Image: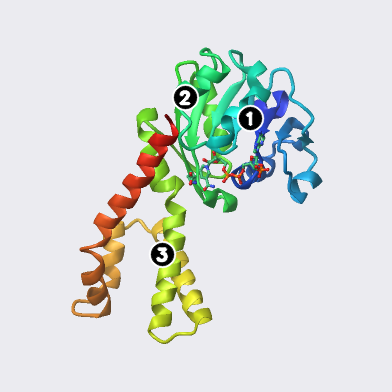
Amino acid sequence: MALERVARDGLVLLGCGKMGTALLTGWLGAGVPARSVWVIEPNPSDWLKASSVHLNEGVPPAPAVALLAVKPQMMGAALPALQALGNGATLFVSIAAGTTIAAFEAALGDRTPIVRTMPNTPAMVNRGITALCRNGHVGDEGMALAVALMAAVGETVILDGEHQIDAVTAVSGSGPAYVFHLIEALAAAGEAEGLSPEVAMQLARATVCGAGELAHRSAESAAQLRVNVTSPGGTTAAALAVLMPELPGLMARAVKAAADRGRELGK
Ligand SMILES: NC(=O)C1=CN([C@@H]2O[C@H](COP(=O)(O)OP(=O)(O)OC[C@H]3O[C@@H](n4cnc5c(N)ncnc54)[C@H](OP(=O)(O)O)[C@@H]3O)[C@@H](O)[C@H]2O)C=CC1
Ligand SMILES: O=C(O)[C@@H]1CCC=N1
């Protein structure tokens, strides 16, 4: 229902790199007509050029949504293209790390309806998760529209407020990179135990994907899924005796570093 408004009144996508492309793919797949989408992107991919969206053709006078998908460092230079849509009925939805609602209000006008979100790259395969929060000018209908847009690429969760978003960025926004690094580290460790690089990487990748899928489908807690692998006195117990004293502290430091960086980008 909410996406019908986008089909009727249009959507502007500012920046169509990795995340913009994932989102646009999801919306087109969910039935939003390409001719309802206006994309501003200085460096369009071949896929984007071949789509039927309005590409670098300006913006319609009152689109339903303007979705901001440029890097936070580029936001200041990019926003003036959409300034005329501020303080109006157009719902602004940002996916940028760091950039605060206050910064958007300062650039676009303090009566602008703004939803700030944090998705992640598994959106590219419809398995993202996006957390959302809003300013006081976004009603329930506007929030439902923002949720529908992000639900086109995965799960959604509504936050208590913007104060939680740097923590979300540090856990699920950046989180896929931690998991990919785990694949790299597990493969390297397999090589050190005598496997070929190819087999080690195949084993590590399939293990992380399989464990992820099991965690996704199973009703059991992560702790119970771990226990299910761990035979008393067996091999897993030996590995966990090394990992468990170290990993929570290391992860807490990594997540804090990401959250601190998010807060820093917001200044
Ligand atoms: N990647 C991730 O895992 C996640 C990213 N995010 C957020 O999503 C946003 C986009 O990230 P991501 O997709 O990775 O970045 P990308 O660099 O892949 O995409 C950003 C795009 O915006 C384009 N761009 C630059 N300047 C302008 C402008 N003035 N007007 C319009 N478009 C412009 C860039 O073009 P060019 O390449 O020519 O500069 C690029 O194609 C960021 O704010 C990031 O914080 C959020 C969650 C996860
Ligand atoms: O690294 C970043 O800043 C962005 C935000 C979350 C994931 N990538």
Spatial CA distance of label 1 from label 3 is: 35 Å
Residue 246 spot, x, y in % from top left: 24, 62
Q: Nearer the viewer, residue 113 or 219?
A: 113
Crowd tier of the residue under label 1, counting other residues whose Cα lies within 10 Å: few below 14, some 14–19, many 20 or above: some
Amino acid type of disc 3?
Leu
Q: Which mark is residue 101?
A: 2
Q: Residue at x 42, y 51 (%)?
A: 175
Q: Specify whether tag 1 is near ligand 1 (CB below 8 Å).
A: yes
Residue 153 spot, x, y in % from top left: 57, 45
- The residue identified by callout 3 is 182
Q: Specify whether tag 3 is near ligand 1 (CB below 8 Å).
A: no
Q: Secondary structure at mark 1?
A: helix
Is residue 264 shown above or below 19?
above
**Residue 243 falls left or right of residue 139:** left
- The residue identified by callout 1 is 78
CB under 8 Å between discs 2 and 1: no
Residue 190 spot, x, y in % from top left: 41, 79
> Which quarter is ligand 1 in?
top right
| Among numbered discs 1 and 3, the one appearing first in the sequence | 1
Spatial CA distance of label 2 from label 1 is: 16 Å
Crowd tier of the residue under label 2, counting other residues whose Cα lies within 10 Å: few below 14, some 14–19, many 20 or above: many
Q: Secondary structure at mark 3?
A: helix
Amino acid type of disc 2?
Ile
Q: Which mark is residue 139?
A: none
Is residue 197 shown above or below 3?
below
Residue 210 spot, x, y in % from top left: 45, 67
